[in-house]
Image: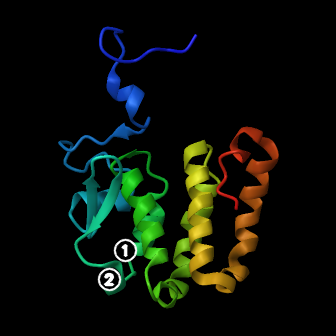
């Protein structure tokens, strides 16, 4: 039978409604942060925040992405793809995608490819399904942004992709393939 959530069931509504990511403790003072992205976010160095809308969350940028310097911001976001705590998960994923989609971003992203590839490869090599799928989505966004400039780096991406796709059929349905 389906598990019921809500008032009077003894189950927490928040677990029924929201994602399963742990929430970062804002009172730790940055001592337990797992990545440079989480540390930079906690220090206020990431120029966006979550706008908790009525239905969907989205990023609200302090400065429009087209006006930002992508180095080191884009590299920090790529490293943040490995985070598993909220709000870092949401911000890193959406910031990476929105930076890739910004007008003229290909000119800013192509020089950063050597710095971005190791973090994407780490996401694709992760044993955590959620991080792997995020890595695939980010790789697609990066490919849409830089096009053929990514071709020289694809050999380093194919190994972890082939390994996971060949051994984990449950992930295949989550892949962002068009």
Residue at 34% across, 9% down: 10
Percent coordinates x, y for residue 49 in the rendering: 26, 60
Placement of 146 over or under 154, stated as above or below: below
Residue at 55% across, 54% down: 134
Residue at 52% across, 76% down: 115
| Disc 1 target residue | 73
* Quadrant assignment for the C terminus: bottom right
Query: Residue 79, can we see it?
Result: yes
Q: In the image, which disc is placed on residue 54?
A: none
> Viewer-proximal residue, 131 or 90?
90
Which residue occupies the extreme right position in the image?
A: 166
Left or right, 28 with respect to 94, comes to: left
Local SS, label 1:
helix
Which residue occupies the extreme front position in the image?
A: 54
Query: Residue 122, can we see it?
Result: no
| Residue 65, quarter of picture | bottom left
Q: In the image, which disc is placed on residue 68?
A: 2
């Amino acid at each position: 039978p389906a598990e019921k959530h809500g008032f009077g069931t003894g189950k927490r509504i928040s677990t029924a409604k929201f994602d399963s990511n742990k929430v970062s403790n804002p009172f730790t003072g940055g001592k337990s942060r797992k990545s440079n992205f989480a540390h930079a976010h906690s220090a206020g160095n990431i120029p966006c925040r979550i706008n908790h809308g009525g239905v969907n969350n989205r990023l609200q940028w302090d400065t429009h992405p087209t006006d930002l310097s992508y180095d080191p911001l884009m590299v920090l976001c790529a490293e943040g793809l490995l985070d598993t705590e909220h709000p870092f998960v949401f911000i890193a994923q959406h910031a990476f995608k929105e930076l890739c989609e910004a007008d003229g971003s290909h000119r800013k992203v192509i020089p950063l490819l050597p710095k971005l590839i190791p973090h994407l490869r780490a996401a694709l090599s992760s044993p955590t399904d959620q991080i792997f799928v995020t890595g695939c989505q980010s790789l697609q966004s990066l490919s849409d942004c830089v096009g053929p400039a990514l071709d020289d780096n694809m050999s380093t991406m194919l190994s972890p992709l082939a390994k996971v796709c060949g051994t984990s059929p449950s992930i295949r349905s989550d892949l962002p393939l068009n």
